[in-house]
Amino acid sequence: MTEKEFKQFFDKNFDSLRSYLYYRCGDKELATDIAQDTFVRIWEKQIPDEGKKTVGLAYKIAGDFFISKFRKNKTKEKYMESLKFDFTENISPEEEMEYKELKEKYEQALAGLSEKQRVVFLMSRMEGLKYGEIAEKLGISVKAVEKRMHGALGAFREILKVAFYMLYFSVYSSLHYLFNTALRFYHI
């Protein structure tokens, strides 16, 4: 690969590779470092630019660098700490508590996903990529993306179902208590 070809390959793929790594680790500096290391490796090995094949190889190299620098648990912890939710309007203490519980359920569901499901889910939902684009960036088939996304959404569905039932029974028990109190108050 000539220097000019390498520069074109770098300019075309660096940002998307760094975004992919950011979704895996949640740390922009680390993602940038690994992306740079990946392109240095490609330059050192003089890998020819063969289009999608070379892009897929770049993602594979980046993934290997990522795994070698961090283990799964450290990455999950750092990502969870990086999640920040701001309240932009005044909300009641009850709403804030419900929000925090839902946020906790979301974080648990996200942490419970396999790394492959989490990467696909975040690329789809955070970056807004279509399945075909995700498949191309990860060097996998669209069917594989669909399967991973189906698994991720299934996990979120289960968590939300549990949260909904908890909320339903909480409201139901509160209404039941209020109804019985009213009956006693009015001696019915």
Image (spheres, grey):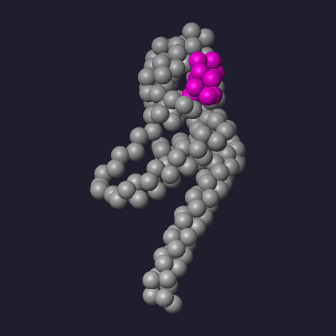
Q: Residue at x 64, y 36 (%)?
A: 115
Q: Residue at 37% x, 56% y: name it.
A: 93
> Residue 107's spot in the image, x, y percent?
54, 44
Q: Where does residue 138 sit, x and y in percent of width and height? A: 61, 35
Left or right: 35, with 145 as reference point: left
* Identity of the residue drawn at 47% across and 33% down: 81
Query: In the rendered image, is residue 112 in sight?
Result: yes
Quadrant of the rendered structure where residue 49 is? top right
- Kindly indicate the quadrant of the structure image that contains residue 62: top right
From the viewer's perspective, is residue 174 above or below residue 121? below
Residue that sits furthest to the top in the current view: 44
Residue 154 percent across, percent down from the top left: 66, 54
Residue 59 in magenta stretch: no
Q: Is residue 185 above or below residue 29?
A: below
Front residue of 2/159: it is: 159
Nearer to the camera, 104 or 3: 104
Q: Is residue 140 above or below residue 131?
A: above
Q: Quadrant of the N terminus?
A: top right
Q: Which residues are magenta?
A: 61-75
Q: Is residue 62 rendered magenta in the image?
A: yes
Q: Position of residue 36 (x, y in %)?
A: 48, 18
